[in-house]
Image: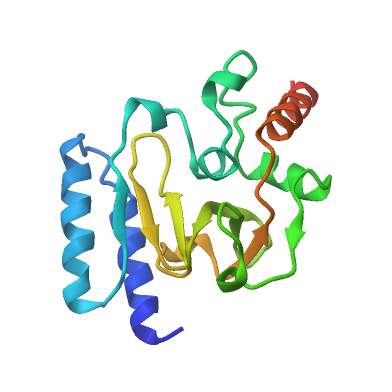
Amino acid sequence: MTSGSHQLRAELTRLTNPPADAGLEWLDHQIQKIAKLNEKYPHNIRLEARWSQATLEMNCFMYALNLNPDAIRDICSDDVFPGEAFVHFLISNGCIEAKPVLPSAASDNDVVIYFDAGGKPTHAGIIRGARIISKWGSRVTHIWEHEIFEVPDYYGDDVRVFRAPDQKRIVLAYIGWATEQL
């Protein structure tokens, strides 16, 4: 990556984490600031979808894995939320199949998962064309279309591709995992 992309990613980190006292108007501010970043750090980030009630209960992993909140509502809680531990479980147990390809050679609907330097899953998105569609942050956040490393820097630099998962298999894996956690 170029130094400009490091700076872009640092700015995206800043713009992905709202101030503690921010209201919903901050989300409009975020869209404007990310667009304006293009003047200083050229990028191809585009708003895919504004936050909505439908995405409110999802994190990036749920979005990328097509894990519908309605399918897991009865067992999902803050203690067993489908976050990094669940994704680690999916990978460790072969519930999602790794593809030995670079993200640029992945197929539509494959999932990319970002890992930090310690190997912890930090973010996920869906491949569409040569682009990624992902939800940044948690709860009330937008869905963005971007290139592979046009993401906040805390998502990490290790990106792996996984075959598009079967939704029923992911739901069953979540129920099994969550039951073990309780």
Q: How many marks?
A: 0
Q: Position of residue 141 (x, y in %)?
A: 34, 41
Work out whether 48 lies above or below 106: above
**Residue at 33% in and 76% down:** 7
Q: Is residue 24 left or right of residue 75?
A: left
Residue located at (54% from left, 28% from top): 68
Looking at the image, residue 83 sits to the left or right of residue 175; the answer is left
Q: Nearer the viewer, residue 156 or 48?
A: 48
In the rendered image, which quarter is residue 177 located in?
top right
Residue at image position (42%, 63%) is 151
Farthest top residue?
Answer: 74
Q: Residue furthest bottom?
A: 2
- Colour pattern: rainbow
Q: Position of residue 1 (x, y in %)?
A: 46, 83
In the image, residue 177 above or below residue 119: above
**Residue 85: % across, % down:** 68, 42
Q: Quadrant of the C terminus?
A: top right
Front residue of 125/22: it is 125
Q: Quadrant of residue 99?
A: bottom right
Taking 26 as reference, is 57 left or right?
right
Q: Name above or below for residue 13 compared with residue 17.
A: below
Residue drawn at x 59%, y 58% is 112
| Vertical position of residue 86 compared to residue 152: above or below | above
Q: Position of residue 49 (x, y in %)?
A: 31, 43
